[in-house]
Image (cartoon, helix red, strand yellow):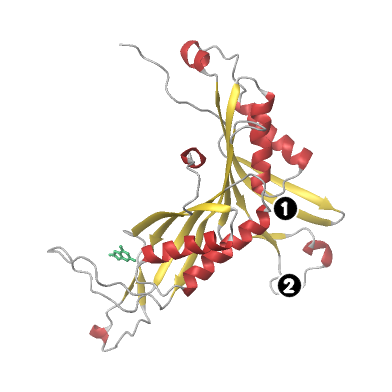
Amino acid sequence: MAIVLGPNRYGKAETRVVRVTKDGGVHHIKDLNVGVSLSGEMEQVHLRGDNAPVLPTDTQKNTVFAFAKKYGIGEIEEFGLLLARHFVDSQPTIHHARVEIEEYSWDRIPVEEGPHLGLRHRQHSFVRNGGEVRTALVHSDGTGGAESVVSGLTDLVVLNSTGSEFHGYIEDEYTTLAPTDDRVLATAVTAQWRHRGTDSSWGRSYRDARRCLLEAFAETHSLSLQQTLYQMGRRVLNERREVCEVRMVMPNKHHFAVDLSPFGMDNDNEVFFAADRPYGLIEGSVLTDDAPDAPAAWN
Ligand SMILES: O=c1[nH]c(=O)c2[nH]c(=O)[nH]c2[nH]1
């Protein structure tokens, strides 16, 4: 029996880099969490501990900081491509780079929240935006080689307080769920969308895709979260032709109407118990029929 080395990769996970760009007194902030993962000719390090082909993960981390200074941080897809191409192009032993980025957004402290703040402070004081996190996943075999870009977001928390039904499902001997023609539908959307190419107007594309997800969630009269998920993906694909596949993960954040009859009160879908677990977990992808197969893009 022979034993061989299987697929492997290595890198520095979760480098937290904050880049402040100073335009006179006006500062801008980019706050990222960057994961780098490299693969290539790594037999000898695994088999013999010979580190000759290894670009240390410490160096990978330093490269993230150095590139933040040297090139600044624009759209995260762009920064991901820049890093991924650099690792493969500069190191003969590295054949593939995967760069995963999360972006946390900061807002300037708004006038309503800090009416007494002077202009100087408004230029360099920020409040963390508690909303969703923007994401990017880039794969590159180097400049001119195979590449893929997947954009996305996590934790986009949305709720429809009506316009949602759920009935007509299988009823077996264990079913207790009552059918409903009016319920709260809430979820925390994780969505990722795969681009056909590697040069897009990343910022515009992101904002539009996010808007499509929100509009479709709000506008779909839902008979199930599965149906809503499909409509959300469909909307992105219809409006953003540079995107060919959308994958979504949506927990059903159940809101149960509380029985207030013991207190002599009715409850016309006004008071809910927001359960945190267990929750239904709805996952699915929506793609165009000409979407090229690209399982590696999601790796
Ligand atoms: O939108 C829903 N989809 C389901 O599959 C499901 N199952 C369930 O119990 N409630 C719901 N809601």
Q: Is mark 1 within 8 Å of ligand 1?
A: no
Q: Nearer the viewer, residue 147 or 51?
A: 147
* Element type where label 1 sits in the image: strand
Q: Is residue 164 left or right of residue 139?
A: left
For the residues labelled 1 and 2, the Cα–Cα distance comes to: 19 Å
Location of ligand 1 given as a quarter of the image: bottom left
The amino acid on which the numbered mark 2 sits, given as a three-letter code, is Val
Work out which residue is located at the far left of the displayed protein and give it. 173
Callout 2 environment at 10 Å: few (<14), some (14 to 19), or many (20+)?
Answer: few
Q: Nearer the viewer, residue 117 or 134?
A: 134
Mark 2 = which residue? Answer: 111
Residue 2 vertical placement versus 129 (above, below): above
Q: Position of residue 199 (x, y in %)?
A: 67, 46
Q: Visible in this render: residue 111?
A: yes
Mark 1 = which residue? Answer: 29
> Sequence order check: which comes first, mark 1 or mark 2?
1
Q: Position of residue 4 (x, y in %)?
A: 40, 16
Q: Quadrant of residue 181?
A: bottom left
Q: Is residue 172 left or right of residue 81?
A: left
